Amino acid sequence: MSFKIIRNDITKVKADVIVNTANPMPMIGRGTDSAVYAAAGPEKLLAARHKIGRLSPGSAAWTPAFDLPARYIIHTVGPVWTGGGHGERDILRSCYAASLSLAAELSAESVAFPLIAAGVYGFPKDEALRIALAEIQRFLLTHDMTVLLVVFDRTVFELSEKLVGEIDEFIDDHGVGVMQEEEYGSAGLRERGRTEIDFLDTEEEEEPLSFHPLPASLMMPPDGWENDMPEMTYGSLPDAVPEETSQGLWGAVPQGASAPHAAFPSGADASLEEFLSSTGPTFRQKLFQLIDASGMDDVTVYKKANIDRKVFSRIRCSEDYRPRKRTAVAFAIALRLDMPAMMDLLSRAEIAFSPSSKFDLIITYFVTHGIYDIYEINAALFKYGQPILGE
């Protein structure tokens, strides 16, 4: 069970529970409420809603889902934004907390939320998102359930202007998408850039991502960027390592840290057998070494990584486990690894980062800024059309 952000019409999402932003009175409102009634069967749903009666802001109640692809509808009344001085934030928190608690009482394994109050009720979208993520995260730390946050259009999915501006500046400074389309031709880009985004559970076709190679001049960060990093050295790496490889987009290896491949035999006289005998820990072995060193238990780690319990159990039991990139990075975030340590862990699964990947740059931005909240990171990844972390 885990958290996912998907782009879809909430009335088409398959989940045990669909959450509806309801009118306080048993009548059909606007926005999501109107769409839910239309899809469920307005007469049947309205009759069931009349049995509940009036709902106060922040409360929640359930009805059957009727014609929706769900078992139940949870109706919750969000706050109308009037400036923030009338308890709107507390009411919105209560909407999520009450709905999640009720979903647990209904033994639901999955629940789909809209971004409550961010539409016709006028709640600022960045604040509505922050509250939604905080309440969902708090719930999932102690419950096993798949929680879906469903947005119909990315334009309603806003981050703070400051965060978006900093991420945009970071991406621009470190070079993504710098080649002009005519260099390859539009047909070539269509052939090369088409990709499937498997984290989207939607019937709508998502815009394909385009991948552009970088000029050699942009493979290194701008002058002065390394001044923001702590003093670093390669320590025990062999002298044969070229100096220019010691600084890159993710900096060098801090003093005392283990560098990827630092255990490789050095010297031209080493035989192939000696090289092969120096094999270090696999991704799985290194992951559990890091978990043990972190002082966290398994449950805390896989919840912080947004990893399903069954997936984590499979990792425990499979010695030849090979993670997907977003799964491996999720564990690195949960363990609060810095960039060198994360690159070391990923390299053991033959996973690399590239300055031409927007996904990689966004992860790099958050890690280098010491931000390890996987919900906030996933919100940014979704905003920029990238697969979110976890599994």
Image (cartoon, helix red, strand yellow):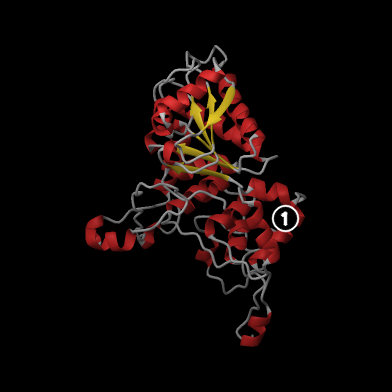
Residue 218 is left or right of residue 97, and the answer is left
Observer able to see residue 301: yes
Image position, residue 260 (x, y; %)? 61, 66
Viewer-proximal residue among 142 and 14: 14
| Element at label 1 | helix
Q: Is residue 382 above or below residue 342?
A: above
Q: Is residue 118 above or below residue 273?
A: above
Picture residue at 25% right of the left edge, 56% below the top: 181
Q: Amino acid at mark 1?
A: Ile
Q: Is residue 10 above or below residue 223?
A: above
Q: Is residue 8 above or below residue 278?
A: above
Tell me which corner region of the image, top left, top right, bottom left or bottom right, holds residue 218: bottom left
Viewer-proximal residue among 101 and 384: 101
Viewer-proximal residue among 304 and 213: 304
Picture residue at 57% right of the left edge, 56% below the top: 327
Residue 191 is left or right of residue 248, and the answer is left
Observer able to see residue 231: no
Image position, residue 9 (x, y; %)? 40, 38
Picture residue at 47% right of the left edge, 51% below the top: 199
Picture residue at 66% right of the left edge, 64% below the top: 284
Tell me which corner region of the image, top left, top right, bottom left or bottom right, holds residue 322: bottom right
Q: Which residue is mark 1?
A: 291
Give the class, few, some or many, for how many residues have Cα within 10 Å of label 1's Cα (few <14, many ≥20): some
Viewer-proximal residue among 235 and 283: 283
Image position, residue 223 (x, y; %)? 45, 51
